Image: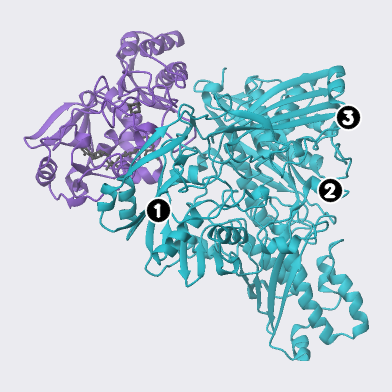
Chain colours: A cyan, B purple
Amino acid sequence: MTAAAPEPKANMGTPVPRYDAAAKVTGRATYAADMPLDNPAYAFLVTSAIAKGRIDRFDLDDARRVRGVIEIVTHENAPKLKESKLFSNGGYAGTTIQPLKSVEIAHDGQIIAVIVAESYEAAREAANRVKVSCTVSAPSATFDSPGATTAAAKGQNAQFKEDPKVGDFAKAFEEAEVKLTAAYDTPAQHHNPMELFTTSCAWMGDNLVIYEGSQYVYGLKNGVAEQLGIDADKVRVVNPYVGGGFGSRGSMTPRTAIIAAIAKRLNRPIKLVPTRDQGFTITTYRAETRHEIRLGASRDGRLVALRHAGFEVSSRPDAYCVGGTKTTTRLYACPNVDSLVSIVRADRNTPGFMRSPPEVPYLFALESALDELAVKLDMDPIELRRINDATNEPIDGKPYTSRSLMACFDEAAKAFGWSQRSPQPKSMSDGDWLIGYGCAATCYPTQMAPCAARVRLQRDGRTRVEIAGHEIGTGAYTIIAQTAAERLGVPLEKVAVFIGDSDLPPAPVAGGSNSTASTCSAVMMVCDQIRQRLLKAVMPSDSLADKAKETVGISPAPSTQAAKSDRPLDIEKAFDALGVGIVEEYGEWKPDGAPMDSFTAMHRGQPRFVGGHQMKDKIAYAFGAEFVEVRINRFTHEIRCPRLVGAFAAGRIMNSRTARSQLMGGLIWGMSSALLEATEIDERYARYVNDNLADYLVPVNADVPGVEVIMLSEQDDHINPAGAKGLGELGNVGTNAAICNAIYHATGQRIRRLPVRLENIEV
Amino acid sequence: MRPFSYQRATDPDMAVQALGAAAAANNPVTKALVQPLAGGTTLIDLMKLDVMRPAAIVDINPLARGWSAIEPKSDGLRLGALAKMSDVAAHAEIERNYPVIADSLKLAASAQLRNMATLGGNVMQRTRCSYFRDVSYENCNKRSPGSGCAAMDGVNRMHAVLGVSDQCIATYPGDFAQALIALDAMAEITGKAGTRSMPFAQLHKAPGSTPDIETTLQPGELISAFSIQGRWPRSVYLKARDRQSYEFALSSAAVALDVQDGAIRDARVALGGVATVPWRAREAEALLKGQEFDEALARRAADAAFAEAKGRRHNSFKIALGKRVVARALQQAVTMEI
Ligand SMILES: Cc1cc2nc3c(=O)[nH]c(=O)nc-3n(C[C@H](O)[C@H](O)[C@H](O)COP(=O)(O)OP(=O)(O)OC[C@H]3O[C@@H](n4cnc5c(N)ncnc54)[C@H](O)[C@@H]3O)c2cc1C
Ligand code: SF4
């Protein structure tokens, strides 16, 4: 075992190497834009240089003269497409701003023309030669911009149902012995996955194949079919590998249906490769947020009052909302809670999911405020959390299915050396560097959604698993293969996994960290169906009923032991008894409490999530604790983060290697969201300025010399058959607060606005 | 990118001729229809962005045989313009006798870029001003003279506080040029009339009313080498930046001192990340010369270096930062073991 492949503890799967490792490191893994097309034409986008206004006129003469140009599509000649509703209103789209429909421009970088040419180079050159005249209106860029409007999220966004509250906050706050009121800000950020937002479309007769990096092949297939007005079964989305998603590929963007329709018109496959900067405006992003936190506590540190008001920017037509108060109002035991989320509309592209959408900005506020409260109380911040640890969430009083928050704090504190910290700010240094230690909690809801799978077993143990899941870099292939191998009792090498194809049985969107729980639960169930057929062939019928109960169950989860049964199943004998060459099963799994229409919705590309605080009688979250050391140079004020230590508990860890990798990436991203990442907005024009990877800063290796991930053993039998909580979005929550808490410790200066840059440090 | 023709120059005459062919009508050199290609890490980038639109490029890499030598001598140093940043940075004698040069290169860009990029191309790299690099912004005086300056009241955190004009506040982004200017380097220029030598300090031009004219180089001219008199073992390059590697300076200082018996006999101070051109802080040098070093002196020198600085909305912090960087670099140079 190595650091990259930690020794599994109880309830952890073995760290088998990635199923797709060799393909990826040798460049054989084919991403969407690598898919061979027969005689393709190449598309290049022209995007608007203004955020608000109207197109008066195109001058396309120059562009048309470029050799190899086939077609220039603008609003004047664009194919007509049907509208798709926002995903949160029952549609598929990440934005309802439909480009090429009219002369209206609703945001910076909106698609205003598509050039199609015989080569990428010709298309791009022609795009450079397009001249467009516009009538420009003054746009509203962000918070406080003239013309931006603010209204409560409730009532605007179907997915934001309630502002959680309980008790009497106003009175309790008024009477609290110790009070804190503080405001926090987080910036706009963009996912910037390595794979660009490419799309290739090829028609064969009435059937369309789309190659596009997607986190939801069923959603995309159904959404594009809706926009084109064709039967969804005629559309197939294929992407065996996705070069990072982070939420940016969860819902449909307008580009796909446009390219599909143009390919149809030209009767030719089309490949679109947008540029990095176009990616900033043709997809979603994390919008900037503001928070006001009020905390009231007794002198001994018990929280008596908590209020969290959040403000989020969205576009004019769409009320996208992350609404993190659902988490921050439930994280600690506090009898009087109030909250309010508001949406501020500006002339921007519609924001969307970005890795841990609600928790990253909202926990920054809460976990920073808790640290400030600890200072006021002259209390160790870990102790403050211990005092307010909860077994039941305060809003509805439901018990946590499992909660290892304080165990994580204790393990991480030990590994980090928290006891070496002298609590006084500005009390630790090393040469030119002031040193600060800080910590914060992380948590992420455990979510599941209906999922189907098909498994085929042959007499020699060869197994094929088919599921329209997504390999977004997390290790989906690997753990699906592991699950099937373990469940069927066949060697791992004999399992082949097929995912990333909407012709396979539907899986939910790879978002909300639900994939492992959903896909593995479905694969387990279908493997059990196979086992039953085999068992039936070799076992007397009377003992079969018991066996079925033992192997197929939803709650409590059947343990691996039970699945394997006391008597190993002799596959060859069972096949001979059955007299068949192949045993194949298809099955549809849904989590406890999923709604009636779960399976039909699943096929329509609409996930019905169960989990987090929305479970009946219980609440399920994964937890962790993160510790950071920051160093601040006395002279340059440069801020560096030499050590990140996180301890996490997330139910069953399917593979300690892939899980560690997710959590490590999370910690690094968390650091990045505190110190580096921010999309700069030119408020005069409501335009993004640093829309490239040289100016939009993400960490390089030298920024993260020490990252330590500790995984705690945790068993939770109340969530899903796999017993797994999602952890893909756990690692990057809270890190931003831990960093600011450490900066306070290093300098005595409290910074409440991200990202923290050297000019914000005053020492 | 737009179509362009490509030609390899196998000897300097051929290069100069190819470059000069369409030169006459085209001034400044950055807008010349024919551009030399060295490592390409600036040129190709700007061509893809449609900022530079040469009709032809002349690949000068075949000249490397004659133009990439690293030649330390007893009384100085000569560096070929086609030497790679990485080779110069890792050269033992340069590390020993010119740490300011070695460090200015080591702390620049990334390993991959340093392996591609040449010294000549490095000093000719162009500003990173986001508005300059994005042609969808109409107002950029450097790109289109007379169109205005989007950065002046825009996102200008990375922009310059020294040498600015009301036409342009773009920062000269490189690191190595600060070391050159501090050490009074000479640039060897090869053109139609042969090779001439000029002080490196005369290469770059502050924006003034013509921000589109960045250097005194004429179309058809190439930098063939840099040379430096003497040795400067007591020298440092200090660079403050947002991340630990692969990032341009928010503020940097190239400092070289000659300290004898506790007194500063000669002092060289140049500033990066804060000025529109490689910036020599002569006022600071004047204060330092002949003095004994202490912290107060370092602070006075730093103040003098930024006496004329003008901050704007997002970059005013660079004035205080720049002063601390200069003071710290001086301190490091004084106390370094040589
Ligand atoms: C992401 C990124 C980060 C970077 N970070 C840094 C940094 O931190 N510090 C830093 O200093 N630099 C940095 N750079 C810039 C990099 O160092 C320069 O791009 C490189 O040095 C240019 O050298 P080149 O040989 O590739 O030049 P080219 O791109 O080939 O040429 C640059 C320009 O100079 C002209 N030219 C080339 N050679 C000559 C010559 N001999 N005579 C006359 N004209 C010539 C070309 O025509 C062109 O206009 C960074 C670049 C990138 C892309
Ligand atoms: S600072 Fe200079 S380069 Fe930048 S926009 Fe203004 S004129 Fe253009």
Residue corresponding to mark 3:
A167
The secondary element bearing badge 1 is classed as loop
Which of labels 2 and 1 is toward the front?
1
Vertical relation: B143 (above or below) A58? above
* Mark 2 neighbour density, 10 Å: few (under 14) some (14–19) many (20 or more): many
Q: Amino acid at mark 2?
A: Ser
**N-term-proximal mark, 2 vs 3:** 3
> In this view of the protein, which residue sits in the foreground, A556 or B251?
A556
Residue A402 numbered mark, or none: 2
> Could you tell me residue A678's position as x and y percent?
53, 34
Q: Quadrant of ligand 2?
A: top left
Residue corresponding to mark 1:
A77
Q: Amino acid at mark 1?
A: Asn
Vertical relation: A461 (above or below) B103? below
Query: Would you identify the image quadrant in which residue A557 lies?
Result: bottom right
The secondary element bearing badge 2 is classed as loop
Residue at 73%, 23% in the rendered image: A372
CA distance separating discs 2 and 1 = 57 Å
Disc 2 sits on a residue from what chain?
Answer: A
On screen, residue A740 versus residue B224, left or right, reads right
